[in-house]
Amino acid sequence: MQQIDMSSDEFLEQMEKTKKFTDKVNKQFGWVYNPNEDVNEGVTMGLARHKILYGKRFCPCYMVLEEDGKHVSADNRVCPCPQAIEKEVPEDGKCHCGIFCTPEYAATHDQ
């Protein structure tokens, strides 16, 4: 597994871009962040890492595989994934990774 220096300028810059990306996703879908900041930080770090390594914000909760010389995510999990948009957030109140939630979910699962 390729290592990334989490204190490098490249990683810190990508973290900032990923935070803006997740802000945009929340705004677009009317979602909010998980009230648990540790979840949000971990997922954001994973998304930033995958963007650096693979060029896409693959869901950090799923394996990234190489098929025919291309990187793909198990179960087609590129953030925000179709599963989160169509099923997980509407039905469960949050996506599988937990970063994106409905306002109702966040209000009842306050940390």
Image: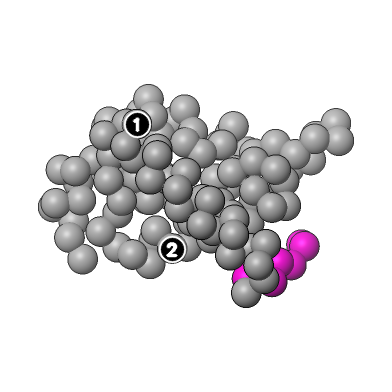
Magenta segment: does it hold 27?
A: no
Q: Residue at x 59, y 59 (%)?
A: 13
**Colour pattern of the rendering:** one colour
Location of residue 87 in the rendering, given as x and y in whole percent from the top left corner: 35, 28
46 left or right of 39 in image? right
Instruction: Give residue 103's quadrant in the image.
Output: top left
Q: Earlier in the sequence, mark 1 or mark 2?
A: 1
Q: Which element is circle 1 on?
A: helix
As drawn, 11 above or below 95: below
How much space separates mark 1 and mark 2, taking CA atoms? 20 Å
Looking at this view, name the residue that lies furthest to the right: 69
Q: Which element is circle 2 on?
A: helix
Q: Amino acid at mark 2?
A: Glu
Residue at the disc numbered 2: 41
Q: Nearer the viewer, residue 77 or 27?
A: 27
78 left or right of 10 in image? left
Marks 1, 2: nearer the viewer: 1
Location of residue 100 in the rendering, given as x and y in whole percent from the top left corner: 35, 45
Residue at the disc numbered 1: 28
Tell me, yes or no, if residue 46 can be seen here. Answer: no
Location of residue 56 in the rendering, given as x and y in whole percent from the top left corner: 64, 41
Q: Residue at x 74, y 67 (%)?
A: 3
Give the position of the N terminus as an image quadrant: bottom right
Q: Residue at x 60, y 43 (%)?
A: 58
Magenta stretch in the rendered image? 1-6
